Amino acid sequence: MSTLSVFVVILNVILALLFSLGLAPILVWVERRVAGLIQDRLGPNRCHIKGIRLGGLVQSLADMLKLVFKEDFQAKAIQENFCFSLAPVIVFVSAFLSFMVIPFADDLIINGERFIMQGLPTDLGILWFLALAGLSVYGIMLGGWASRSKYSLLGAMRAGAQVISYEAAMGLSVVSLLITYGSIHLGDIVAYQGELLFGFIPAWGIIVQPIAAIIFIVTAFAEANRTPFDLAEGESEIVGGYHTEYSAMRFGLFFVGEYVAMSASSALIVTLFLGGYHLPYLNTQTLQTTMPYVLGFIILTLPLGSFYAMRWIKKHNRWYLKSDVRNTESAVLQKGLIGLNILVIAGLGALLYLGLTPTSTNVATAVIQVLTFAAKLFLMNFVFVWVRWTLPRFRYDQLQTLGWKVLMPLAIANIVISAIIIVVKGL
Amino acid sequence: MGIKVVKRHGNTLKEKLYLPAIFGGMKTTLSHFITNLSDKPHISTILYPEEQPHDISERYRGVHRLTKRDDESVRCVACFMCATACPAECIFIEAEERTDGVDEKMPKRFDIDLLECVFCGACVEACPCDAIRMDSGIFSFIGKKREDFVLTKEQLLANKEKKQ
Amino acid sequence: MMDILFLLLGSFAILGAIGMVGFHQPVHSALSLILTILALAGLFALLSASFLFMVQIIIYAGAILTLFIFIIMFLNVKEANLPKEPTKNITLFLGSLALLPFNFLILRAFYQMPLHVNSVESDFGKIKPLGMELFTQWLLPFELISILLLVALIGAVVLGRKDEA
């Protein structure tokens, strides 16, 4: 193993960590702020470190600190100490591991060496995700059972039944996708989506397989236990569901695990249906051939975008009292943005001026693709949050009816139809 | 008896598909989100401790106050009407004889326990002399001990009417 | 490295199996069964049968045992209502003693088998060659098994249905 390959592997693991763990506090913030704005409120906005609020993001840090230092209370009735402690770990680890097979960028080629840009360099792809989604339910069921509380047990039962029934529909919708893409390796699936359909539409999964996309997205909401399928923690009926008896960091693991699972689901949706790391109309090859133009475009648009962002920040990032330290934030942000602009433009300009070598083109491609993937992931997470604050919760029998009587037959029909089309067209 | 047949909703194909309704709802929430990010947000949240509420009306029932006569002496005649009307029994009055010739009786002690008070305004309604009012406009009363929340006659006299 | 992994996974599988028989609580038994199944999946992965590895986890650990645990939790038998098994340990010991000659037979058969030492092809155990094999050479057994599963499914539905009185 050369130092380069070690470096790339470490980089991939760090990217996976950032996209799952690093995104969790940001997602908590997004959830609370978006909920506030949707309901005509403000959401958390006071917490600050020397005036830096970042729109309330600091609140997430404060909440995390609170969770770590809280008393880890455990009811006396809980005798299954091992199971009780193991449950949140299972939820967290399986959510985190399912992130490991998502490709962040196309295979990176440096000096003739080929690196797969995902956390674990395996081509198990979607099977890995399905397996870990199945395992994560053990955490919920074990936690609910070990809590020895009726609410927890009810929540765990609901979660178990829900995940089992929706896993069937999810697996079947994936089968029709696999028939279309002809591979289970997520890298191949994304490469397929880089092509154009009829010469002008990007062949994204949501266009090629719209029914599978709808089924998969609905079941992904159910697998991640998000509204409208969050019956497992229906607070109006069963208090907190399976994590009623948990506190402090053990609850924190459940909490973070939920967001990591949501992020992993979004990553898979992006990879399967929204073109993965591809920009529309720019697959890896065209991106590499038009790299100078793309870099030039970035150099031109970055200052413009920063200007409008700064104008928005100056208009909205105000505190009621003039003398408050929070009012100094805009100036700090402005300096940061200007510095970032100078750095990026100088770097890209130097790259263009010195001329692009194959290696630097490949690295630039990978960076752009990782950023594209991050942006798509963030948008999909936003959709998860957005849906949560729009839709009410399903009733339990409606949930099972939808899973077994609607989604499942639809998925099977979709498999048959796509198989027929594939065979007839001889693809 | 006439029977009114109510038309049931949810049987057309469009309604059974759920998705149009879901997208409709998502459109509504997104429009709220975008409006609130724009230059003219519809957010009426105030930054409370720094920014005080500005919609406290004339009739808002805040902390009580004892009114005064023209000569700045207490108007209350210790008739116990308010203490009798009080559903929470939070008014404690001790009467004494008034010697300055303005009236015959006045309270020696007039305590209101704000921790027991339910701010119903029955005392104000019951008072025959207009001696107790709740128009001070104080909506947030802070203390560090239980004893702090028992307002004495002097404190009640010191509360001023909120200027509109 | 492979040997250490094999020993670890093997001992986990055996420990899980022992726990599955030995534990008193049904949930604990089911959990040790999960341990066994996961260890077996790891052994498949060591044999570079990656598809079997995933299927073992998805089907057995992810679906079947979830149902087991679901049912056990659903019944939620109280500690006092569990059957008393005072002679369990002796029964287990005697049972394993009785199976010992059988073990020797298996070991003997195992040592008589020719050893495969030639390395497997690069796409061994992957989903594509496996699917090709299943749908060309073993098509009839595959379809027959599917029909068997379908029959079992319909049978379960028919048996489980309430009588319409």
Image: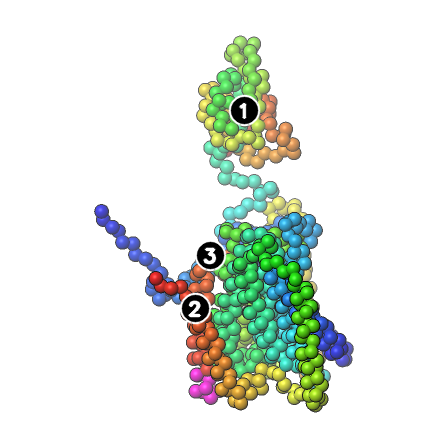
Q: Say which residue label 1 marks.
A: B91
Q: Are marks 2 and 1 in contact (CB under 8 Å)?
A: no
* Marks 1,3: beta carbons within 8 A: no
Residue drawn at the location 57% of the way across and 36% of the way down = B140
- Which secondary structure dominates the residues rendered in magenta? helix
Return the mark for residue C159: 2
Tell me the SS state at disc 3: loop
Amino acid marked by disc 1? Ile
Mark closer to the observer (3, 2):
2
| C-alpha distance separating marks 2 and 1 | 73 Å
The chain identifier of the residue carrying mark 1 reads B
Say which of A286 and A342 sits in front: A286
Determine the CA span between mark 3 and mark 2: 37 Å
Q: Which residue is mark 3?
A: A392
Q: Which residues are magenta?
A: A420-427
SS of the residue under disc 1: strand
Three-letter code, disc 3: Pro
Rendered view: C14 above or below A391: below
Give the residue displayed 65% in from the left and 74% down from the top.
C40
Q: Position of residue C101 (x, y in %)?
A: 69, 78
Q: On the image, which quarter does residue C131 sit in?
A: bottom right
Q: Of tags 2 and 1, which is closer to the observer? A: 2
